[in-house]
Image (cartoon, grey):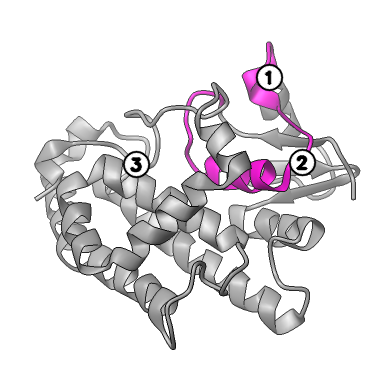
Amino acid sequence: MVQPYELFYWPSIQGRGEFVRLALEEAGADYVDVARRDGGVDLLMAALEVGDHPSFAPPFLKAGEQTIGQVANILLYLGEQHGLAPRTEPGRLWVHQLQLTIADLVAEAHDTHHPIASMLYYEDQKPEAKRRAADFVETRIPKFMAYFARLLANPEPRDYLLGERVSYADLSLFQVIEGLRYAFPNAMKKVEQEHPELTGLRDRVAARPRIAAYLASPRRIPFNQDGIFRRYPELDA
């Protein structure tokens, strides 16, 4: 196990980097959030251009000589290193599968406010965003959330997706619930009324000692209008 880790992500947003931060915090790992230090963004940009296996984009994690990119890939590594995933191969692949499903949901959430192009401002694609968000609120949030609620309830109620033990997928699901509460509070109120299992998981993760300390600290960047989850009331039917 190589520490301290170096996490490379944008310094002013939670974004996709937050899924990695939550895992590092729960693990009690020693890490440096590189771009949040003086001159860190320049270091981040330079790191994208070097090495035999450069990342396409942030976030990426340096663990000794290794550079690991893509959220699900980083969490696959951290899960094995820090006990945030099962030791068996079927168990590791199942948690990885859950994380990839979460990644699909995160991408769809992003596309509600940038359905045409990431390089355009939201104001340049508002009609398209409204149409995209309507489908996301009406069909996609309920479908994804019902899936995770079913995993938490069947064959019997459980604390976490795998049972009694937390995994990085639980931490990521917590982050998604928090993000959707921020961006689509009306839609999430309806979903959580129908699926209290989601609220229960969210509350259990938030109460975990290391996560609670992190959420109360300045290390936790507030949600804002530059991240994946953005609050535009007109999109929250």
Is disc 3 in contact with disc 2, using a CB cutoff of under 8 Å?
no
Residue sitting nearer the eye, 214 or 90 = 214
Residue position marked by numbered label 3 in the rendering: 229
Q: Secondary structure at mark 3?
A: loop
Query: Which residue lies at the image location 39% right of the left edge and 41% below the top edge?
Result: 228
Marker disc for residue 29: 2
Q: Is residue 12 magenta?
A: yes
What amino acid is labelled 1 in the image?
Gly
Per the model, the C-alpha gap separating discs 3 and 2 is: 26 Å
Please identify, in this view, whether the residue under mark 3 or under mark 2 is nearer the observer: 2
Please identify, in this view, whether the residue under mark 3 or under mark 1 is nearer the observer: 3
Q: Please say if 215 is above or below 151.
A: above
Q: Secondary structure at mark 2?
A: loop
Residue sitting nearer the eye, 224 or 192 = 192
Give the magenta part as a residue range.
Answer: 11-40
- Please provide percent x and percent y for residue 35: 65, 23
Numbered marks: total: 3
Q: Is residue 132 magenta?
A: no
Per the model, the C-alpha gap separating discs 2 and 1 is: 20 Å
Q: Please say if 118 is above or below 73.
A: above
- Please provide percent x and percent y for residue 7: 70, 36
What amino acid is labelled 3 in the image?
Phe
Residue position marked by numbered label 1 in the rendering: 40
Q: Please say if 20 is above or below 167.
A: above
Is any atom of residue 59 visible in this view?
A: no
Is 59 on the left or on the right of 229, as rendered? right
